[in-house]
Amino acid sequence: MSGLDKMKSQILDEANHSADKKIAEAKAKAEKILKEAEAEAAAQAEIISNKAQADAENYKQRIESSCEMQRKQAILRAKQDVIAAVLDKAYNKILNLETGEYFDMIRRMLDKYVLPEEGMICFSAEDLKRMPAGFEAEIQKTAVSKGGALELSREAKEMEGGFVLVYGGIEENCTVKALFDAKRDELSDKVQGLLF
């Protein structure tokens, strides 16, 4: 082998050796990058998995909270319906009282609402028909005891139960409905206290 061949052979050996070394370094570097990428991917997967679990738990809690709120609202509506039914029943019971009891209630209402002024009192057609004998005199007596006077209107008012007082063109609505409406919240609270 000539000197030139030896030099070529030596250069080739060194080049092969250098190439093998660079290949080994590249493989090691590639392996390191791959391991780092796998670790990063695992860490990201863990983060994504944890976030997904947290989101799922949060969603579950929101659904449970929403269901609980809907349940409470349904219970509240049912209670309100029961209370309204009880108040409607009480209202109708008052309107359908036996004549004596009904006019006893009217007497108490007169005592409470009549003013010390001159005015007129109006009743429904039904109440004018069933008014007990002498009740007009009782109305006058109550008005006088309060320092006023009341004239009974023979013209029926369109209403259910109770009466309307008219003083100087101003009407004071003392119908059973108006009194119920004015006390609805208070009555609802009492019924709720009794039932629930």
Image (cartoon, helix red, strand yellow):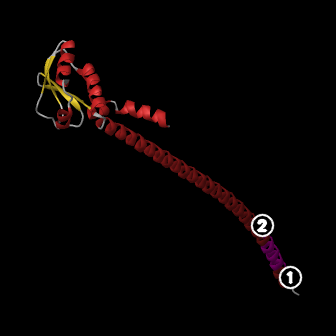
Drawn side of residue 45 relative to residue 11, left or right: left
Looking at the rendered structure, the kind of residue marked 1 is Lys
Nearer the camera: disc 2 or disc 1: 2
Magenta residues span 10-21
Q: Which mark is residue 18?
A: none
Q: Secondary structure at mark 1?
A: helix
User: Which residue has dot 1 on it?
Assistant: 6
Q: Position of residue 60 (x, y in %)?
A: 57, 53
Q: In the rendered structure, does residue 53 fall within the stretch colored magenta?
A: no
Q: Main secondary structure of the magenta part?
A: helix
Q: Which mark is residue 28?
A: 2
Q: Position of residue 61 (x, y in %)?
A: 57, 50
* Number of other residues with Cα within 10 Å of mark 1, as a class: few under 14, some 14 to 19, many 20 or more: few
* Number of other residues with Cα within 10 Å of mark 2, as a class: few under 14, some 14 to 19, many 20 or more: few
Residue at x-position 29% and y-position 26%: 104
Q: What is the tally of numbered marks visible in this picture?
A: 2
Residue at the farthest right position: 1
In which quadrant of the rendered view does residue 1 lie?
bottom right
Query: Which of 82 and 110 lies nearest the eye of the viewer?
Result: 110
Residue at the farthest front position: 133
Looking at the rendered structure, the kind of residue marked 2 is Ala
Query: Which of 54 and 6 lies nearest the eye of the viewer?
Result: 54
Residue at x-position 38% and y-position 41%: 84
Q: Position of residue 51 (x, y in %)?
A: 61, 54
Observer able to see residue 146: no
Disc 2 versus disc 1: distance between alpha carbons? 32 Å
Drawn side of residue 52 relative to residue 81, left or right: right
Observer able to see residue 49: yes
Of labels 2 and 1, earlier in sequence is 1
Say if 167 sits above or below 48 in the image.
Answer: above
In which quadrant of the rendered view does residue 14 lie?
bottom right
